[in-house]
Image (spheres, rainbow, N blue to C red):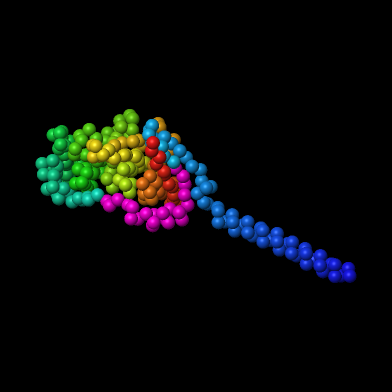
Amino acid sequence: MRRQCNILYKKEEMKNYLIIFLLLTTNLVFAQETDGQDETFEIKEAKLNDNCTIRLKQITKEKYIAQKEQSEHLQHKPYDAITDVHKAQKMLRKRFKVIERKEEGADFDYSKYEITFRDKTKEHLDIEYGFIAYFPQLEILLFEGGHTTEHMFDLNNSNSLITFEENFPEYIRIGNPYRHSISPDKQLRINGFHDGQDCIHYFLEKWNKSKKQYEFINYFYSSHSSMYICYAENWYWTEKNKVIFTIFAGGKDEYFEYTEFYEIEIIEK
């Protein structure tokens, strides 16, 4: 009788161990499935102006890839870019002159440029500037300056030049068309340019229907915003007010390089 009771006890004990094991393994699987989901990331909110707020949250690599694939059809077609300087000169005629010269005793040629804006203002660029592209849809000329700075010239606005003044870049309202990212409904546009040092300065714009142009809202980092979005690339709009992107978040040493994935939600009044 005692032996039978011991056997029954051991069976009950094994049953309890099995239940505990199943509970532990179930909890472990659940933790693995939920670990790294968006809910675990902090959501940051910043006010760009009185009418626009953005919410930033980190997302998983898997979610970024899935949303990128699902939103391919929502992306804006890139602007036409004329990368042949002589073709650009032919299209713009007197508005863009290429002055090719050769230094005495040197075995290379160099070019200087003269740009004439719509208001007849002229801008002369020295040999430190290299032609990159002309965007006829935007009437913008793109050059690369010293330290790979990006310089854009809006031929319709002679006041849009990039100069490195004390309040740089807060006053700049022009960006590199290669960095433009337009929302699916074309009401919002992310713009930006590289300063030749480390940062790509990104700002948000909104379409003005009456003026038929995008107007500046604010930089993603500024006196109005606590967010610092600098090394961002690979922007993809997933909705008319949501955009995902990647950030290089490591050091310059290749052994520390890694990428983070983010989503911005734009909230307008």
Residue 131, given in percent of the width and then of the height, sits at: 21, 46
Q: Residue at x 19, y 43 (%)?
A: 139
User: Does residue 69 show up magenta in the picture?
Assistant: yes
In the drawing, does residue 192 fall left or right of residue 265? left
Number of marks present in the image shown = 0
Residue drawn at (44%, 41%) of the image: 55
Q: Height in image: 62 above or below 162?
A: below
On-image quarter of the N terminus = bottom right
Which residue extends farthest right? 1
Give the residue furthest to the left: 94
Question: At 33% from the left edge and 29% from the top edge, which residue is drawn?
Answer: 166
Q: Nearer the viewer, residue 82 or 239?
A: 239
Out of 189 and 93, give the one closest to the viewer. Answer: 189
- The magenta-colored residue range is 56-78
Note whether 87 is above or below 166 in the view shown: below
Tell me the quarter of the picture where residue 115 sits: top left
Quarter of the image for residue 112 reads top left
Direction from residue 65 to residue 23 in the image, left or right = right
Q: Does any portion of residue 145 appear in the rendered image?
A: no
Q: Quadrant of the C terminus?
A: top left
Q: What is the x, y in percent for residue 57?
A: 46, 44
Residue drawn where x is 11% and y is 44% of the image: 93
Query: In this view of the protein, can residue 37 be seen by the observer?
Result: yes
Residue 31 lies left or right of residue 169; in this view the side is right
Where residue 116 sits: x, y (%)? 15, 37
Q: Position of residue 135 (x, y in %)?
A: 21, 46
Quarter of the view holding residue 63? bottom left
